[in-house]
Image: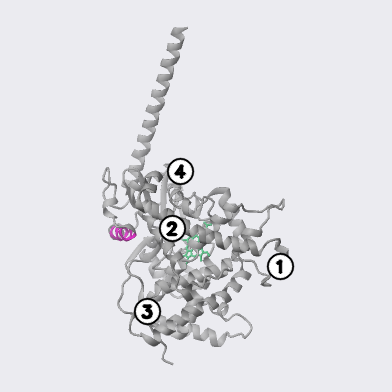
């Protein structure tokens, strides 16, 4: 009996030792193959402890400078980023590589999910995958239906009035002083988003209340800092640091704002159905649905709420982030470009005036007339507002630039800025809009991303940028002061030193 027991014990010991040995061998093989893949990429030499970190220190600005440096040496190869010994990702830069990964429908990176889930929530449409993402996307797509977008344009026009008033004051009192337009645009886009998607009045523009916008910027900074620092990768360690504590506090504030918006609407919709709203029974009489109506009133086939409370919250957090920081960056960089290239500013202004004169329809929405042709899209080319998105691949991939099959579990970052900086994209997007439409490969110019996971707010964002620009260019001119933005990757592309121009009244 004792011998049998001993035999069992030794067999168990052998099995455990073999299991552990196999695990180590597998890990070593994976590590070696990962190294092979990383060695084929462009980028700094990989240090055994620091990886390539020493060359892209300094947060978002460091990663952009690193990208620029190694793009100059080897423009087509993917870029390697090794954050310490264990966190690695590869930034793909050529349209063919990006196409390959996008068409694979690879899931989002678990690392990015881990960093963003405490803020946006696990079912957030931006970071969720698989059936949850598909379900949310199907539910939320109608929030950007053409009919709603036309309605939103009127609201965008209304919320641009406080912005016009501020610029009017600046142009009258201090026309020769540099103005950082980014802060004004941040309030305009937040106000617009709250009015359109949530039908919620913040009055943030009139009160100059930028607490929410600052909280979003701070959180984005922390996420990038965490992604670039292996010491902060552990949730426990991060929570104990002062940054971790501040992050939690800011998240709580953002969540409280979102919750109060949801609660207020829930109260307004008490006892109402989708049909009631369509029959103008809402106290305001408004028959159109917005994003929040869709979240709260959608029902599944059994008549139960289509989203749980947590899911509604997660989508609100996501839209409050993705729906205003991106357009702030876009508006700021469009302004920078227009100031820098006055001849293009004149062309865009002439176009706006032409549309106002030729297409004026007293009862129609004038802005929607201008939109279809206003050539502002191309200005997003040098500055893709959302920096990059990460996907994760386990499947056998053989990208164009990497001769090794990537059958490893690897995070791939689709680097929009680097792709847009490729000389052929540059040449194509600088051609006339018609030639651009005809010839630009969708994988070489994709400020709103491509494939299934493209930006759900694409048309909303373009409308918002165009509305503001049409309103502003009719009244003001942006004058270059020789200011060069110091670009930083803070989830959304930002400028560390603001975006400064002079704002002057147009000479009539
Ligand atoms: C100029 C402004 C904008 C730019 C450049 C932009 C760009 C992008 C990009 C590149 C993605 C893909 C991100 C990824 O896969 O990681 C994305 C996704 C997304 N965007 Fe935008 N965006 C803008 C404005 C907006 C606005 C105004 C909204 C909402 C009102 C919005 C909501 C979203 C959402 C919810 C997603 C996730 C979609 C999904 O995964 O199904 N974005 N955006």
Residue 255 placement (x, y as % from top left): 50, 57
From the image, give the main secondary structure of the stretch colored magenta: helix
Tell me if 483 is positioned left or right of 247 in this view.
left
Task: Please tell me how crowded label 3 is: few (under 14), some (14-19), or many (20+) other residues with Cα within 10 Å.
Answer: many
The picture places residue 14, in percent across and down from the top left corner, at 40, 19
The residue beneath circle 4 is: 396
Q: Are marks 4 and 3 in contact (CB under 8 Å)?
A: no
Q: Quarter-wise, where is residue 184 in the image? A: bottom left
Percent of width and height locating residue 401: 37, 52
* Residue at disc 3, secondary structure: helix
Give the CA separation, mark 2 to mark 3.
35 Å
Residue picked out by circle 1: 278
Q: Is residue 66 magenta?
A: yes
Comparing labels 2 and 4, the label whose residue is closer to the camera: 2
Region of the chain picked out in magenta, as a range: 60-69
Tell me if the residue at label 1 has its CB under 8 Å from ligand 1: no
Per the image, the residue denoted by label 3 is 339
Q: Is residue 493 left or right of residue 131?
A: left
Residue that badge 2 annotates: 250
């Amino acid at each position: 009996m004792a011998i049998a027991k001993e035999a069992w014990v030794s067999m168990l010991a052998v099995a455990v030792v073999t299991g552990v040995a196999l695990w180590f061998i597998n890990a070593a093989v994976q590590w070696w193959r990962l190294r092979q893949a990383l060695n084929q990429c462009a980028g700094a030499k990989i240090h055994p402890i620091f990886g390539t970190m020493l060359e892209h220190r300094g947060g978002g600005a460091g990663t952009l400078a690193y990208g620029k440096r190694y793009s100059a040496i080897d423009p087509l190869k993917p870029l390697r980023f090794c954050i310490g010994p264990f966190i690695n990702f590869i930034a793909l830069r050529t349209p063919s590589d990006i196409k390959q990964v996008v068409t694979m429908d690879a899931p989002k990176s678990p690392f990015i999910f881990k960093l963003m889930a405490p803020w946006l929530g696990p079912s957030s449409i931006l970071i969720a995958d698989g059936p949850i993402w598909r379900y949310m996307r199907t539910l939320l797509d109608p929030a950007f239906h053409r009919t709603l977008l036309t309605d939103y344009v009127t609201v965008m026009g209304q919320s641009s009035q406080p912005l016009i008033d501020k610029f009017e004051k600046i142009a009258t009192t201090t026309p020769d002083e540099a103005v950082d337009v980014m802060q004004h645009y941040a309030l305009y886009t937040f106000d617009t988003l709250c009015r359109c998607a949530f039908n919620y009045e913040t009055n943030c523009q009139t009160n100059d209340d930028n607490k929410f916008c600052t909280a979003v910027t701070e959180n984005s900074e922390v996420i990038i800092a965490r992604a670039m620092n292996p010491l902060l990768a552990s949730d426990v360690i991060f929570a104990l640091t002062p940054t971790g504590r501040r992050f939690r506090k800011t998240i709580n504030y953002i969540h409280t704002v979102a919750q109060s918006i949801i609660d207020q609407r829930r109260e307004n919709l008490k006892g109402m159905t989708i049909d009631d709203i369509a029959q103008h029974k809402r106290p305001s009489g408004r028959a159109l649905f917005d994003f929040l109506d869709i979240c709260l009133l959608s029902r599944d086939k059994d008549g139960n709420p289509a989203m749980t409370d947590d899911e509604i919250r997660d989508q609100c957090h996501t839209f409050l982030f993705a729906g205003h920081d991106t357009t702030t960056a876009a508006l700021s960089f469009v302004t920078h470009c227009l100031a820098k290239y006055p001849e293009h500013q004149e062309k865009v202004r002439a176009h706006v005036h032409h549309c106002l004169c030729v297409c004026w329809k007293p009862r129609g929405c004038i802005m929607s007339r201008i939109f279809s042709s206003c050539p502002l899209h191309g200005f997003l080319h040098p500055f893709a507002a959302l920096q990059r998105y990460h996907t994760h691949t386990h499947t056998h991939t053989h990208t164009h630039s990497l001769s090794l099959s990537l059958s490893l579990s690897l995070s791939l970052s689709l680097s929009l800025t680097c792709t847009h900086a490729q000389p052929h994209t540059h040449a194509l997007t600088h051609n006339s809009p018609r030639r651009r439409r005809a010839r630009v490969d969708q994988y070489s110019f994709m400020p709103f991303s491509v494939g299934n996971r493209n930006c759900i707010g694409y048309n909303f964002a373009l409308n918002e940028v165009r509305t503001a620009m049409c309103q502003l260019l009719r009244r003001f001119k942006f004058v270059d002061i020789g200011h060069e933005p110091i670009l930083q990757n803070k989830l959304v592309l930002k400028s560390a030193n603001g975006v400064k121009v002079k704002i002057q009244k147009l000479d009539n």
